[in-house]
Amino acid sequence: MNSRLTKLALATLISASIGLSPFTVMAADPVPASAPAAAPVAVPTTPAPAAQPEKATKKSKKQAKKDKKAEKKAKKKAKKKAKAAQEPAATQQ
């Protein structure tokens, strides 16, 4: 009986949180929908010039790592296929 009560309490809690989620979103919204939007603060859309080369090197390193991993995986797969092709030939003899 205790597990049934626990399941019922959990289901009630979940359904209540799902039902109340639109209200929490409205409460978190600082500006009402009917009010005109204030001018946004100017935020630079491009990062600082010094950060761009750093980002590029980081991105290229990440891509190189990804390529190396894919190559290693392909080699492993090919090796496995070759081994699987050899086994049936060996068992037939």
Image: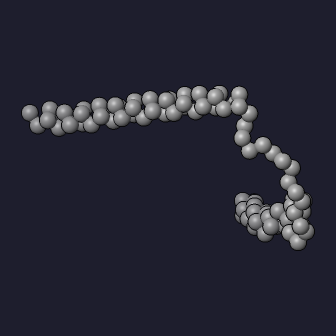
Q: Is residue 80 above or below residue 3?
A: above
Question: Residue 51's image quarter?
Answer: top right
| Residue 70 percent across, percent down from the top left | 42, 35
| Residue 38 percent across, percent down from the top left | 89, 60
| Residue 58 percent across, percent down from the top left | 60, 29
Identified at 36% across, 35% down, the residue is 74
Q: Is residue 31 above or below residue 83?
A: below
Identified at 64% across, 28% down, the residue is 53
Q: Is residue 33 above or below residue 85?
A: below
Q: Considering the image in quadrants, where does the C terminus appear?
A: top left
Q: Is residue 12 above or below residue 51?
A: below
Question: Residue 73's image quarter?
Answer: top left
Q: Is residue 76 left or right of residue 52?
A: left
Identified at 59% across, 27% down, the residue is 57
Identified at 86% across, 69% down, the residue is 33
Q: Considering the image in quadrants, where does the N terminus appear?
A: bottom right
